[in-house]
């Protein structure tokens, strides 16, 4: 190498710094090309290896480190990362649903998942049915039922489902149970061990965009399971579809994870204080938060989250019917600390008005217009003052 040109030595440096280095944060690896030690190592590798160092898309030490931490957070065994929560949802649907299958969705499901399933119905003839998450008897799978989506709690109307009843019924019917666990974040309850009977869902999907990121500045999703066959099925689709995440984004989430429990607890406490304050205001017909004793699904929340006594920092209100759309919009626009935005789990409080008629099945009549608050980490007195001044304006 002595005689090689400077440009070659820049690309193939003579000295290698020692790799042994201890620090709190792991290194960020960025790679498309990944080296093999030998042709034998290259030929012996398999996409099924737990740490498949073969191509940047499949994973790097940074992304595998994050995947291991998310599996630990949720009490699972295996984790696959996707570029967004919705992409993780898509991976599950695409892996397990085939033409002629039937999929069951809660009628308060995260909207884009329902839109995606509608698309699958049109393109691939996959049938979908809605069930009432508060009533397990509304879930009536036929022999063609393949998968049931669960959401605890629904992310806008915040009903906590009969998770125990639904999972028991799905298991009896041999239907795959998939939970969108973004609300619980692995902190409110363990999706793989959530009742006195140690019930478990088969797969937990998590929008890491929310609490694990914590900064409202990274998009990512995860698919966690305890069953290797399910993990490998999703991994195959992941590999075939060319899905991967960048090392910088993974490192940002790794950095936020040690504080997730503190942030979740603070936002939970802030949300409950605000829910109590909102309940005393005349203009609201109802305040929606699963820990409120009169909330829909409160008993189911207690059954599953009673031990942790945790809930995410989301609270919704239903304005009394006399408030018009213009008034509700004016209220949202008048808020100064609460910003108009969708993606929760960050430090800043958010507000969003929703039109409910598209969201739940007929029979679930909601009086008035709904506004969802995602509570951040600001001082609670300042948030109350902000709500007060905005309410005065309408
Ligand atoms: C309950 C729930 N699941 C999944 C997602 C999708 O996450 P992402 O924004 O990372 O695609 C969201 C995002 O708002 C969500 O609220």
Image (cartoon, rainbow, N blue to C red):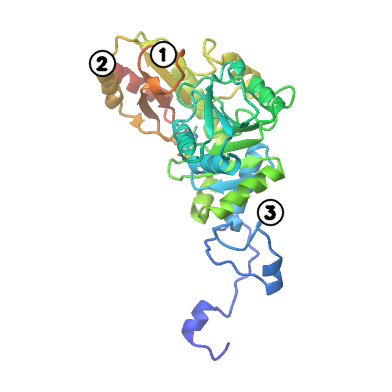
Q: Quadrant of the C terminus?
A: top left
Image coordinates for residue 5, horizontal then vertical, percent:
49, 87
Q: Is residue 278 above or below residue 187?
A: above
Residue at numbered disc 3: 50
Crowdedness of circle 2 by 10 Å Cα count: few (<14), some, many (20+)? some
Q: Is residue 70 above or below residue 292?
A: below
Judged from this view, the residue extending furthest toward the right is 197
Residue at numbered disc 1: 366
Crowdedness of circle 1 by 10 Å Cα count: few (<14), some, many (20+)? some
39 horizontally vs 262: left or right: right
Crowdedness of circle 3 by 10 Å Cα count: few (<14), some, many (20+)? few
Q: SS class of the residue under badge 3?
A: loop
Q: Quadrant of residue 179?
A: top right
Q: Quadrant of the N terminus?
A: bottom right
Name the residue located 61 percent from the left edge and 52 percent from the top edge: 64
| Ligand 1 neighbours mark 2 (CB distance < 8 Å) | no
- State which mark lies toward you, 2 or 3: 3
State which tag comes first along the sequence, 2 or 3: 3
Name the residue located 34 percent from the left edge and 29 percent from the top edge: 337
Residue 25 visible in the shown view: no
Image coordinates for residue 323, horizontal then vertical, percent:
29, 13
383 horizontally vs 311: left or right: left
Report the disc number at residue 394.
2
17 horizontally vs 123: left or right: right
């Amino acid at each position: 190498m002595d005689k090689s040109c400077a440009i070659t030595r820049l690309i193939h440096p003579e000295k290698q710094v020692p790799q042994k280095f201890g620090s709190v944060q792991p290194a960020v690896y960025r790679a498309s090309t990944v080296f093999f030690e030998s042709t034998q190592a290259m030929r012996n590798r398999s996409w099924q290896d737990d740490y498949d160092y073969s191509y940047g898309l499949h994973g790097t030490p940074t992304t595998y480190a994050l995947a291991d931490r998310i599996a630990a957070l949720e009490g699972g065994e295996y984790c696959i990362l996707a570029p967004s929560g919705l992409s993780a949802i898509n991976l599950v649907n695409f892996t397990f649903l085939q033409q002629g299958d039937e999929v069951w969705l809660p009628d308060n499901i995260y909207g884009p998942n329902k839109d995606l399933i509608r698309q699958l119905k049109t393109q691939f003839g996959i049938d979908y049915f809605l069930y009432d998450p508060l009533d397990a008897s509304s879930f009536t799978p036929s022999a063609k039922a393949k998968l049931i989506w669960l959401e605890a709690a629904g992310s806008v109307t915040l009903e906590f489902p009969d998770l125990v009843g639904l999972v028991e019924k799905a298991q009896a019917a041999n239907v795959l149970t998939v939970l969108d666990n973004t609300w619980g974040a692995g902190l409110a309850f363990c999706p793989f061990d959530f009742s006195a009977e140690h019930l478990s869902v088969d797969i937990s999907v998590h929008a890491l965009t929310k609490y694990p990121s914590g900064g409202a500045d990274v998009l990512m999703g995860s698919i966690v399971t305890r069953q290797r066959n399910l993990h490998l099925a999703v991994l195959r689709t992941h590999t075939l579809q060319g899905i991967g995440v960048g090392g910088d984004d993974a490192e940002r989430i790794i950095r936020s994870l040690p504080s997730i429990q503190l942030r979740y607890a603070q936002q939970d406490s802030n949300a409950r204080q605000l829910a109590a304050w909102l309940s005393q205001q005349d203009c609201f017909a109802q305040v929606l938060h699963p820990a409120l004793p009169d909330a829909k699904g409160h008993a189911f929340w207690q059954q599953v989250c009673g031990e942790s006594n945790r809930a995410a920092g989301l609270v919704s209100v239903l304005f009394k019917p006399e408030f018009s759309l213009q008034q509700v919009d004016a209220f949202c626009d008048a808020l100064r600390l609460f910003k108009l935005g969708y993606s929760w789990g960050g430090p800043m409080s958010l507000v969003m008005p929703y039109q409910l008629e598209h969201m739940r099945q007929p029979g679930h009549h909601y009086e008035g217009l709904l506004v969802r608050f995602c509570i951040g980490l600001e001082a609670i007195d300042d948030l109350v003052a902000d709500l007060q001044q905005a309410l005065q304006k309408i």
